[in-house]
Image (cartoon, grey):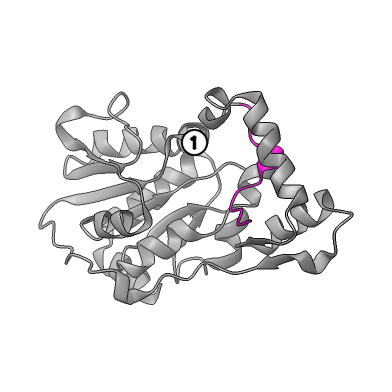
Amino acid sequence: LDIDDNLFEIDASNPFLTHLPKKFEMHLLGMAVDAKYVTTTTERLANKLRKERYYRPKESVVVIPNLISTDRYKPAKINNKDKIVIGYAGGSSHYNDLHKSNAIDALQKIMHEYKNVYVQSAGIKLDKYLPKARYEFLGGTSGVQKWLDFYSTFKFDIGLAPILDTPFNLCKSNIKWQEYSLMGIPTIASKIGPYEDSIKHASTGYLVKNTMDDWYNAFKLMIENESLRRKIGEKA
């Protein structure tokens, strides 16, 4: 079995739980503990699984880190002229991460001050919270190859990766940073778990605390400093 989420500590607010019958949830958990072998992408999630699978050998949980072949991407050249596009790609389960981290509030403030800032999102709509004339929903897709093809069309100047400090998120991987980085897109991410582990602050990304001031100041710095954006994107 391959598992990439902490099924044992899903946040109560996660839309996944809303639509998941209890019987099926228990079935998933049963498979996670009963499978002869389990593969996953992070050591944190592997350790969680080993605790839940206490009657299985520790070696039955194997970590295979994320690896995205650069051959699979054909990134578009980013040239938005006088526009600055801040982008986000992720599913609806990240609703609270976007809003309770203060990232969206800071984005609203930045868009009010900088009329050349535009926002695009894929996978989740943000149209209720941002100026409609400068916001675009890019849609979504399913399947690995379709997602890679879809992702290669993004032209973000800045990539957004907020997460809350929860047991569920701490077991997440840094895949969003990897995806942005392969496109040469500099990432602003929460200084938590997978991003704190992998991003070198102000070198291969920008780490922030989940406060209004931190998100706002990071947006402002990146918007006003094109050479910094390019330097971080290339380094990542």
| Residue that mark 1 sits on | 93
Q: Secondary structure at mark 1?
A: helix
Segment tinted magenta in the rendering: 1-12
Vertical arrangement, residue 119 with respect to residue 79, above or below: above
Quadrant containing the C terminus in the rendered view: bottom left
In this rendering, position of residue 215 left or right of residue 24: left
Vertical arrangement, residue 128 with respect to residue 213, above or below: above
Q: Is residue 21 magenta?
A: no
* Mark 1 Cα shell of 10 Å, populated few (<14), some (14-19), many (≥20): some
In this rendering, position of residue 7 left or right of residue 145: right
Q: Amino acid at mark 1?
A: Ser
Q: Is residue 7 magenta?
A: yes
| Picture quadrant of residue 111 | top left
Q: Let me know if residue 175 appears in the view.
A: yes
In this rendering, position of residue 159 left or right of residue 6: left
Residue 164: percent from left, percent from top: 58, 41
Furthest toward the left, the residue is: 81
Residue 109: percent from left, percent from top: 33, 34
Asked whether 231 or 95 is in front, the reply is: 95
